[in-house]
Image (cartoon, rainbow, N blue to C red):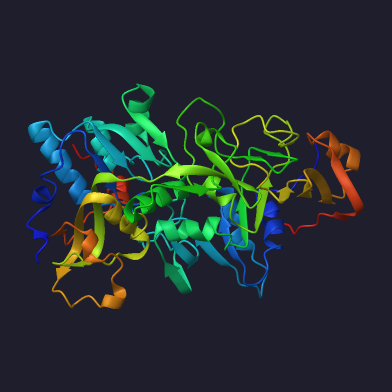
């Protein structure tokens, strides 16, 4: 059994790279957790596709206002300095390159930066939401994910086998084992858990990990 | 000029079989529940309107609103980005039975297609969906070294939307994130029908606060205590 980061710890690590003053979109589900781990003293402004900038945490139960929700249809609150706008403006912010970071989940990420995160195949009801827009707008598109699937297969691969969300769009991947940049269509290993050797990590990765200089140690707090 | 009508039933009385209808709202926020339910009432009483094309971000939730229209068998085609919800039974059952068609559109592309429809722009290029299954069969082009997909405008026979304040000239404000697609839809439909929490005299909405100018609006009905889709859902209400 190899030690690995919890989802909260992956989200914490991703949050450390969000600069003060950044405009950020967090994908629905697991990525929403990143908002909880803003380093003290830094202010990030969160964007939601359905037309809010600078929303905050969920209200207490019973105090929800169902005209005040996020893209995951969960009730949120407003922070001072929030704004509302319609859907075309919201996606102008996305595609127009006005967001600094988008942090998304993934089924698969290819070394080319291709992302598959919207469909697990032809069965069932297809649903895309804003996923295909979000991968093409933010200055930085980061993915947070377990390093492998539930049955132990690599999620970081040479080429995605599932339907693509976008081509060559991901710039950094935070996994349960490592932090990896995508540069010139290659995985470049930046940080890994100290308890793992490079060979062990490579064995769980579906494409070659490039090492440039020293590999940092992936250190996160107990959460 | 007076665009007000007495009740939701008369507001939607001319929506006919086979029409395309843009319905405002994102999930429950901004969903014009009373106008939707007035359509369902007429369908139960007369058998019309049916064979409708519904354009909305989602495809209904639970047994109310758009989901209840689908349940009733009024909807032939759904154009949306995300036909899943907390309780997507209505759409899922009809889709798996082959009784409803789905045009799946990425959310930002859906918004921009509606915007383009209202703005007289027949097509545009977007990076969204390039290289994916949703771009299959669509023209692509390179601009400044990057590839883009051509998308076409989206227009409709009717838009039904929810506003916060309206005046009798059709000027509108919205409530919080209930705005979402509604200003775009108001411009992209031949006939735009609005339910507003309150109808006020012209001049009582500060022109600085008007989000949708009355030019885009055909008729307005006051629904003072509108129901909220999410609240109905949680209460387990079924509208039939």
Is residue A203 visible to us here? Answer: yes
Across and down, in percent, residue B34 comes to: 19, 50
Q: Residue at x 68, y 68 (%)?
A: A19
Is A144 or A194 nearer to us in this picture? A144
- Counting labels gives 0
Outermost residue on the top side: it is: B97
Across and down, in percent, residue B195 comes to: 19, 57
Which image quadrant: the N terminus of chain A?
A: top right
Left or right: residue A128 compared with residue B235: right
Is residue B30 visible to us here? Answer: no
Which image quadrant: the C terminus of chain A?
A: bottom right
Indicate whether A116 appears above or below B95: below
Left or right: residue A40 compared with residue A60: right
Q: Residue at x 84, y 42 (%)?
A: A209
Q: Residue at x 12, y 61 (%)?
A: B3
Across and down, in percent, residue B92 comes to: 37, 30
Q: Residue at x 44, y 41 (%)?
A: B105
Q: Based on the displayed image, in which of its 4 quarters is residue A106 positioned?
A: top right
Across and down, in percent, residue A97 comes to: 58, 60
Outermost residue on the right side: it is: A213
Indicate whether A51 appears above or below B160: below
């Amino acid at each position: 059994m190899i030690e690995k980061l919890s989802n909260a710890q992956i989200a914490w690590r991703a949050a450390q790279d969000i600069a003060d003053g950044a405009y950020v979109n967090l994908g629905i589900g697991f990525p929403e957790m990143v908002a909880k781990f803003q380093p003290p003293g830094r202010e990030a402004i969160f964007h939601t596709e359905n037309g809010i900038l600078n929303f905050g945490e969920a209200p207490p139960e019973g105090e929800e206002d169902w005209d005040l929700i996020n893209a995951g249809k969960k009730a949120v609150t407003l922070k001072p300095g929030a704004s509302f706008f319609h859907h075309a403006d919201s996606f102008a912010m996305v595609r127009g390159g006005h967001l600094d970071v988008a942090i998304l989940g993934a089924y698969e990420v290819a070394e080319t930066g291709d992302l598959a995160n919207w469909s697990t195949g032809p069965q069932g009801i297809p649903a895309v939401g804003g996923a295909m827009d979000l991968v093409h707008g933010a200055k930085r598109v980061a993915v947070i994910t377990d390093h492998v699937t539930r049955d132990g297969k690599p999620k970081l691969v040479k080429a995605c086998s599932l339907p693509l969300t976008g081509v060559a769009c991901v710039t950094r991947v935070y996994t349960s084992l490592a932090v990896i940049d995508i540069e010139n269509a290659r995985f470049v290993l930046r940080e890994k858990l100290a308890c793992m050797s490079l060979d062990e990590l490579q064995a769980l990765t579906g494409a070659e990990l490039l090492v440039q200089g020293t590999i940092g140690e992936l250190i996160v707090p107990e959460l | 000029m007076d665009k007000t009508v007495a009740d939701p039933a008369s507001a939607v009385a001319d929506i006919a079989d086979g029409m395309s209808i843009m319905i405002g709202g994102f999930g429950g926020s901004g969903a014009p529940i009373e106008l939707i339910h007035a359509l369902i009432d007429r369908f139960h009483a007369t058998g019309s309107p049916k064979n409708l094309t519904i354009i909305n971000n989602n495809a209904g939730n639970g047994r109310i609103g758009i989901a209840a229209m689908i349940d009733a068998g009024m909807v032939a085609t759904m154009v949306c980005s995300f036909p899943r919800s907390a309780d997507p039974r209505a759409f899922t059952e009809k889709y798996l039975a082959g009784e409803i068609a789905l045009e799946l559109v990425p959310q930002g592309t859906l918004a921009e297609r509606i915007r383009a429809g209202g703005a007289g722009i027949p097509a545009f290029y977007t990076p969204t969906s390039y290289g994916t299954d949703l771009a299959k069969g669509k023209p692509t082009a390179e601009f400044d070294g990057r590839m883009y997909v051509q998308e076409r405008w989206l227009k409709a026979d009717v838009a039904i939307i929810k506003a916060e304040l309206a005046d009798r000239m059709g000027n509108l404000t919205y409530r919080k994130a209930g705005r979402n697609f509604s200003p775009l839809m108001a411009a992209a439909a031949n006939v735009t029908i609005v339910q507003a929490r309150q109808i006020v005299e012209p001049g009582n909405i500060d022109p600085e606060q008007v989000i949708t100018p009355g030019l885009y609006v055909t008729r307005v009905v006051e629904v003072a205590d509108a129901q909220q889709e999410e609240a109905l859902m949680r209460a387990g209400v079924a509208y039939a």
